[in-house]
Amino acid sequence: MGHAVERFVSGSPGRVAHVALRDPEGGWSRSWRAGDDVGYPPASLTKVPLVAVALLAAESGLLNLDARVLPEVFHTSAFPNVLSVVSTPLTLRELAALAIVLSDNLAAQALLDVVDDTQWGRGVAAMGCPGLARPVGYRDQDFDAMWSETTTVDEQVSILAVVDRLDSLAPLRAWMGASLRNNRISTLIPPPARFHHKTGSLDGVHHDVGLLDVGDHTAQVVALTAAQPDPLGTASDMAELGVAVVAALSG
């Protein structure tokens, strides 16, 4: 497994990767990492803690995920998005699902608009990530500001561990497993294996992080990149990493 992680990182500068296998006691005792964890723009990876905070707020009675949002309050975008064809009110729960399954920016923004600072603070504290910054936003005008956000492998590992551990975040884990955007690591992974993941993309930035289930075994997989000159090549290298992790879990 270590060779596969090193091979992915050596494919191009600006890459870091981490793979950890869950042990019988539920911990992550076996892990491999390569590359410089210097901090990367997270892009859409921030949607995972956003949805996690919403679910935790709902569990605490601070947010009603069955509340409906009228289409006329949705933001607009020059980029393709599912909300541009929605003509009926959607619940916050449905918007949370769309933010993960389709990585829809406007669905995520509609959720961010109703999650207040108190809910955010309580949620990230409950996740054990009290320093996690609130996302700058997902509107077209927020794209430049996204470059000022940063994430690290350790931060992503912490978030994935919480998603895997907390029963209240089971819907989030399921939505990550139903992702229809940017296969990357899961491209060559056949069912019944399932990668519960989220990708993040900006110019030259191509991430994929998640929990890979193969039978009774689970692995954390984090691949962060920046300044990638060949997006297709990066995606192909991620797919090869995914195959190697499946082989490790199946062995």
Image: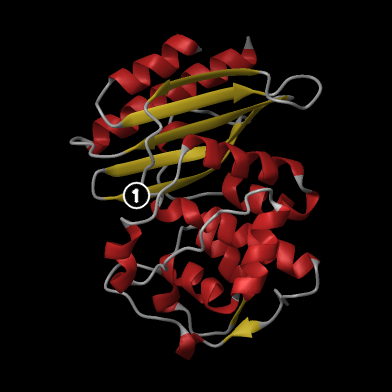
- On the image, the x and y values in percent for residue 215 come to 70, 24
- Taking 36 as reference, is 5 above or below it? above
Q: Residue at horizontal 40%, vertical 45%?
A: 182
Q: Residue at horizontal 49%, vertical 55%?
A: 46
Disc tally is: 1
Residue furthest to the front in view is 131
- On the image, the x and y values in percent for residue 204 come to 24, 44
Going by the numbered disc 1, the residue's amino acid type is: Ser
Image quadrant occupied by the C terminus: top right
- Residue on which the image places disc 1: 201
Q: Is mark 1 on a helix, strand or loop?
A: strand
- On the image, the x and y values in percent for residue 241 come to 43, 22
Q: In this view, does 227 lie to the left or right of 242?
A: left
Q: Residue at horizontal 50%, vertical 28%?
A: 189
Report the front residue among 7 and 86.
Answer: 7
Report the front residue among 32 and 245.
Answer: 32
Task: Please identify the quarter of the rendering in which residue 67 is found.
Answer: bottom right
Task: Please identify the quarter of the rendering in which residue 147 is found.
Answer: bottom left
Task: Please identify the quarter of the rendering in which residue 216 is found.
Answer: top right
- On the image, the x and y values in percent for residue 217 come to 70, 23
Q: Which colour scheme is used?
A: secondary structure
- Taking 142 as reference, is 130 above or below it? above
- Taking 51 as reference, is 216 above or below it? above
Report the front residue among 1 and 174.
Answer: 1
Q: Residues within 10 Å of mark 1 (few under 14, many from 20)?
A: some
Q: Residue at horizontal 58%, vertical 14%?
A: 248
